[in-house]
Image: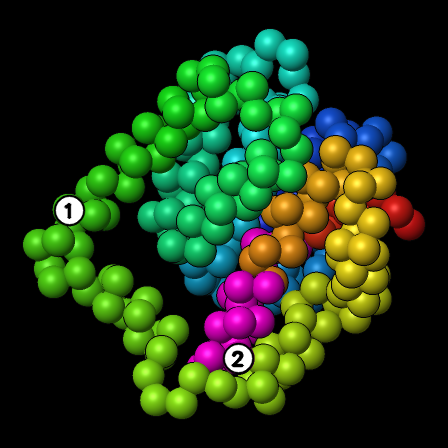
């Protein structure tokens, strides 16, 4: 179980750097402490599952993405780090794919940052991620896409596709995953941000883009058939930074 504990500890350290990069040293320290003590992170520190490496990959990817976005002259090292993190994260769990979607939403929401799309950095990152995922794709192709079949089975889009109580159960379960105070605070910020999107800072938009879509997608999944409580765990990396920065 030690690797899971070390992975989550490393994720907390990465959150310190994200918080410091976006805000300051104090916010960074509180981000690391808060993340390390989240109910779900505490649980996953004693359980061998795919969530610990997924959280580490997502945290590193977010740090590299922030670095690429915030620097006037983004470095190639951040692009390589982003690609490696996405690629390894996808090998750990396909939920890492949400990161690409969240990135796309950020560029839609912040036109000023679309200039980065005309530079090679993001495309280098996607190329590296694809190369790291390629062995997984090849294995699936030669084994009847077993992993994809398992993922589709978990989604279970068959029969009646309307279960409002399951969606509510998933939403309620996030109180235990993120913690009741933090989750309610994040909900208030998310709904408030949607109502006053024009007044949000770029940092707030970034942190919301990397948390809100994941939760919304899984609420829809819960409505269609059901969603496990831990499926939205990646949303709480940026959500932790957002909530801590406001407290």
* Residue 45 against residue 101 in the figure, above or below: below
* Residue 55 against residue 178 in the figure, above or below: above
* Residue 183 against residue 52 in the figure, above or below: below
Question: Relative to 148, is 29 on the left or the right?
Answer: right
From this viewpoint, which residue is outermost toward the top?
Answer: 73
Classify mark 2: helix, strand or loop: helix
Q: In this view of the protein, can residue 57 be seen by the observer?
A: no
Q: Residue at x 60, y 63 (%)?
A: 215
Q: Which mark is residue 223?
A: 2
Image coords of residue 23 (percent x, y):
82, 31
Question: Relative to 168, is 156 on the left or the right?
Answer: left
Mark closer to the observer (2, 1) = 2
* Residue 72 against residue 48 in the figure, above or below: above
Main SS of the magenta part reads helix
Would you name the residue on which mark 1 appears? 138
Q: Judge whether residue 227 is colored magenta.
A: yes
Question: Relative to 43, is 119 on the left or the right?
Answer: left
Classify mark 1: helix, strand or loop: helix
The range drawn in magenta is 216-238
Q: Judge whether residue 35 is colored magenta.
A: no
Q: Residue at x 45, y 25 (%)?
A: 122
Q: In this view of the protein, can residue 49 be seen by the observer?
A: yes
């Amino acid at each position: 179980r030690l690797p899971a504990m070390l992975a989550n500890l490393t994720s907390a350290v990465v959150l310190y750097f994200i918080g410091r990069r976006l805000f300051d040293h104090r916010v960074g320290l509180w981000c690391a402490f808060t993340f390390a003590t989240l109910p779900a992170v505490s649980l996953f520190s004693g359980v061998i599952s795919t969530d610990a490496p997924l959280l580490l990959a997502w945290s590193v990817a977010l740090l590299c993405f922030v670095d690429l976005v915030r620097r006037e002259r983004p470095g190639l090292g951040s692009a390589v780090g982003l690609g490696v993190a996405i690629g390894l994260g996808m090998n750990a769990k396909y939920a890492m794919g949400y990161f690409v979607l969240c990135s796309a939403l950020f560029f839609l929401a912040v036109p000023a940052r679309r200039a980065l799309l005309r530079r090679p950095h993001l495309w280098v990152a996607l190329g590296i991620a694809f190369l790291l995922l390629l062995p997984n794709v090849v294995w699936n192709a030669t084994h009847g896409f077993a992993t994809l079949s398992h993922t589709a089975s978990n989604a279970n889009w068959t029969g009646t596709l309307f279960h409002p109580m399951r969606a509510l159960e998933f939403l309620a379960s996030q109180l235990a995953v993120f913690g009741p105070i933090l989750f309610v605070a994040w909900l208030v910020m998310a709904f408030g941000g949607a109502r006053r999107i024009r007044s949000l800072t770029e940092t707030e938009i970034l942190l919301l883009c990397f948390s809100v879509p994941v939760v919304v997608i899984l609420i829809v999944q819960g409505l269609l058939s059901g969603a496990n409580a831990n499926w939205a765990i990646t949303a709480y990396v940026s959500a932790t930074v957002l909530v801590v920065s406001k407290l």
